[in-house]
Image (cartoon, rainbow, N blue to C red):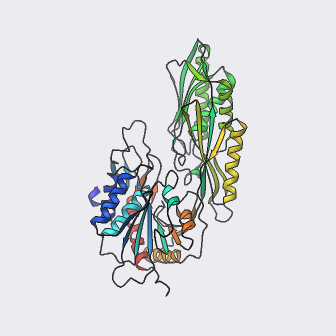
Amino acid sequence: MEKKDLKPAGVFHYFEEICQVPRPSKKEEKIIAYLKAFGEKNNLETLVDEVGNVLIKKPATPGLENRKTVVLQSHVDMVCEKNNDVKHDFLTDPIDTEIDGEWLKAKGTTLGADNGIGVATELALLADDSIEHGPLECLFTIDEETGMTGAFALKEGFMNGNILLNLDSEDEGELYIGCAGGVDSVADFTYQEVDVPTGYFFSKIQVKGLKGGHSGGDIHLGRGNANKILNRFLNQTFKKYDMYLCEIEGGNLRNAIAREAHAVIALPEADKHALRADLNVFAAEVQAEYNVVDPDLQLLMESEAARAKAIDKDTTKRLIQAIYATPHGVYAMSQDIPGLVETSTNLASVKMKPNHIIRIETSQRSSITSAKQDIANMVRTVFEMAGAEVSFGDGYPGWKPNPHSEILEVASESYKRLFGVDAKVKAIHAGLECGLFLDKYPSLDMISFGPTLQGVHSPDERMLIPTVQKFWDHLLDILKNIPEKKS
C-alpha cells in the first residue's frame, strides 16, 4: 500500500498536508494561518478568536437547512515526543510518515494523529461539496494537550450549534459520552550546592526502554514509570553509601507516563564495584516485575566526568523520600461504569531548574470532582511534608455522561445499520475538551469518537488505516440523519 492509495483520499490528503505544518502545543501560529487560508480559499466564513481558536462555517446542502446545527470539533496542537537518537525540530520540521502494514506511523516521533486526524476529517468535509449535511460549524481549538487553553478561553456565542461531535477519541467503534476532569500539581524543592569531596567517582544511572503512554488512557495498564524506578535505586544507594546527587532528570509532559530518567551520582572510589553489583541485582528484580508490560526496560550505568558540585544531603534525602512516597497510577475504579478508571495520578516529570530548584510535575484525574481534589491534596501533603513548595494548575472539569442523549441514539443506530454490530458506549479516563464546552454551552448534546490510534503521546503513536474509512463512513451517515430543529 502506498500513501497515494490511502482511503478516504480526502482525509489522508489533508492529514499529509497538515503533517507539513509544525504545530506543537502553545506554538500553533502556523496551523492557525493554514486554517484561515483554507477557509478563505474555499469561500467559507472563517472566524478566529483572541486566543487562536478557529471556526469555519459551512451552510447546509439544499433541502437540509432545517436540521439542527452540528459543531465538529478537534484540536490543532500535537504532543511533540521523539526518540533520543532522532534528530527532529518540531518547530520547523515536517512529520515524516510511513506505512507499516495496516498502520500509519512517523519515523521516530509522535505522528500527531492525536488530533490531526480529526482536523483532517473536518477539512475533507468542508472541501467536499458532494457530501449531504445540515448547517455545519467546524471548531479547531488550540493547546488541548498542555492545558486546554483554547477550550478554556472559548467565549459564549462564538459557535451556535446544538450538537457537538468531538473527533478526539482513539478506538473505532466506541462512542464516548463522558470523561475525567484533571488538575496539575507542581512541587518545587530549593537546594544548596555543596562540594563533592575528593576521591569520589561519578556515575550516570539511566532508566530507558519503557513504553510510557498517555497518563489517562494508558494508566490502567500498570506500565513502569521511569521516575519511580530510578528513584527506587537512588533510595537504596543513598541509604547504603555516602552518595552525592549531582543531577536528576526524568519524564517530560504532564500527560505522559515517564519513559526515560537519569541521575548523576558520586560515591567513594572504593564503592565502585559494589554499586555495579547492586545495579545488576536491582535491574534483574525490576525487569522481572515489569517483564509482561514493559519487556524492554533497561537500567544502565556509565562513568561520568567529575562534577565539582552536588545537591545538599538534606534536600537529596527529602527529595528521594517524597518521590518514593508519592502515589502513581490508578487510585480508584468507577462504581458506575465497569472497567473505567475513576481516579488516578501521574508522577510526570522531575527537572532541575535555574536558581537551585528541582521541580516535580504531577497530574491527577478523576470523573468525580471531590475525588480529583482529594488525590491532588494527597500528593500535595507528601511534598509539603518533605518541605517542598506546592502549587496547583487551574484544572479542568469532567464531562458527566448522559445515557439519554439524542445524538448518542443517532450515532448508535447509524453504526448498527452500517456495520451490523453495536458500537460500545463508554466514558474515558483521559481529559476531553467536552467538559469545558458544557461550561459555556450547557445545552450542547455531545459524543466523542474517532479512528483507532495506539501509543499516542509517544514515538510509537500509530493509526490503524482501515478504521479511518469506517470512522468517515459513520460520520457522514450521522450527518445525514441529524434531527430537524424543533419549531
Can see residue 376?
Answer: yes
Q: The N terminus is located in which quarter?
A: bottom left
Residue 118 screen position, x and y as percent: 41, 62
Residue furthest out toward the front:
50
Decide: is 206 above or below 476: above
Q: Is residue 340 left or right of residue 306?
A: right
Residue 123 screen position, x and y as percent: 35, 64
Q: Is residue 116 left or right of residue 412?
A: left
Out of 231 and 222, give the one closest to the viewer. Answer: 231
The residue sitting at 37% across, 48% down in the picture is 106
Decide: is 45 above or below 6: below
The residue sitting at 42% across, 42% down in the picture is 82
Can see residue 100?
Answer: no
Decide: is 314 above or below 345: above
The residue sitting at 59% across, 17% down in the picture is 196
Residue furthest out toward the bottom:
487
Kindly indicate the quadrant of the structure image that contains residue 73: bottom left
Q: Is residue 97 left or right of residue 384?
A: left
Q: Is residue 207 left or right of residue 97?
A: right
Residue 53 screen position, x and y as percent: 43, 60
Q: How many marks?
A: 0
Out of 298 and 268, give the one closest to the viewer. Answer: 268
Residue 22 screen position, x and y as percent: 36, 49
Residue furthest out toward the top:
199
